[in-house]
Amino acid sequence: MTTRPALTPEELAASPVLVPQQTHDHTVDAAAPQKVVVDGVAFDAVTETEVVDHVLREMSAGRGGMLLTPNVDILRQLRRPDLQGIAAQADIVVADGMPIVWASRIQGSPLPERVTGASLAGSLPAAAASAGRSVYLLGGEEGVAEAAAENLASDHEGLRVAGWHCPPHGFERDEDQMGAIVEDLQRTQPDLVLVGLGFPKQERLIGVLRSTLPRAWFIGCGGALTFLSGRVSRAPEGIQKSGFEWLHRLAMEPRRMARRYLVDDLPYAAGLFARSARRSTALNGRAA
């Protein structure tokens, strides 16, 4: 894996949009790569267990990487020209939303399962604890990352929490704030970094920070730090598997989530299924 030279805090602060510049071949198994393209994004056809095993193997080999977990809202945004490169610079891309899994089935190239950032934010630290690895939590509202770190350490014996940090609003345009993040990561040298700042800010930040820690694995986990902190609960497992976890989120945070789910994502999901159906028809027509 080729890495860029580490950037100085001044260089980081000089790039307020934090656009990643490196492109990676996000292959989970180089011997038998299997990709499923859904609405223009290539997803790795893997289970959560396979993702965790791969990350631990890469850590043992001294190689870092980036995990991208698009849900419907992120997949919608990845159609924007200024965001299309984010998926290409990830090492592993998995489907966080059940509608993406359904779309893959409709088009005739099914993904094996939904793999959410929220679940990986629990399973990866658990695996890291068993391997004697460390984790760093970055993001969330004031006190969220610290509470999440305490809960992870309590739940997973042997987990080394390298640190946590909740950057203030606008930190990416502040030289001192960016420098403090880089300095703390370089000082603590975590193996796994959970970044909960929301898409695309967390992915843009990861695209910059990973050059300072080429052996670490980064995952943009959105609101998962809030779940880990205990401030907001995830839906029961049955609802998660049904594909209607968004209804639980909407009920828990109606003012924050209503526009995203009802105005932006539902129409996009309908279009996604229609495009997947047309893709299936086209592929079947060529096969005939």
Image: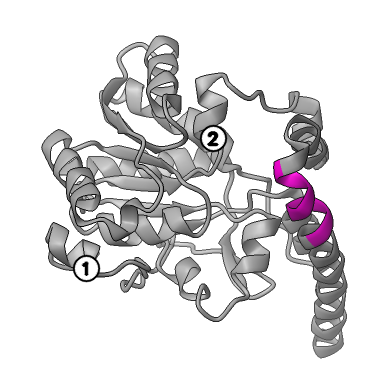
Q: Is residue 257 magenta?
A: yes
| Main SS, magenta residues | helix
Looking at the rendered image, the quarter that the C terminus falls into is bottom right
Examine the image and state in which quarter residue 168 appears.
top left
Which residues fall within the magenta stretch?
A: 256-263
Position of residue 153 measured from the top left corner of the image (x, y, whole percent): 37, 15
Q: Distance between the residues labelled 2 and 1?
A: 30 Å
Nearest to viewer (mark 2 / mark 1): 2
- Residue that carries the numbered disc 2 in the rendered image: 224
Q: Residue at x 60, y 42 (%)?
A: 116
**Residue 147 location (% of width, % of height):** 43, 19
Residue at the (36%, 73%) spot, across then down: 23
Q: Is residue 75 left or right of residue 248?
A: left
Residue 119, picture quadrant: top right
Please state the horizontal and vertical placement of residue 94, each as a whole percent of the image: 57, 53
Residue type beneath disc 2:
Ala
Rendered image: mark on residue 2:
1
> Can see residue 125?
yes
Quadrant housing the N terminus: bottom left
Pick whichever, 108 or 179, lies toward us: 179
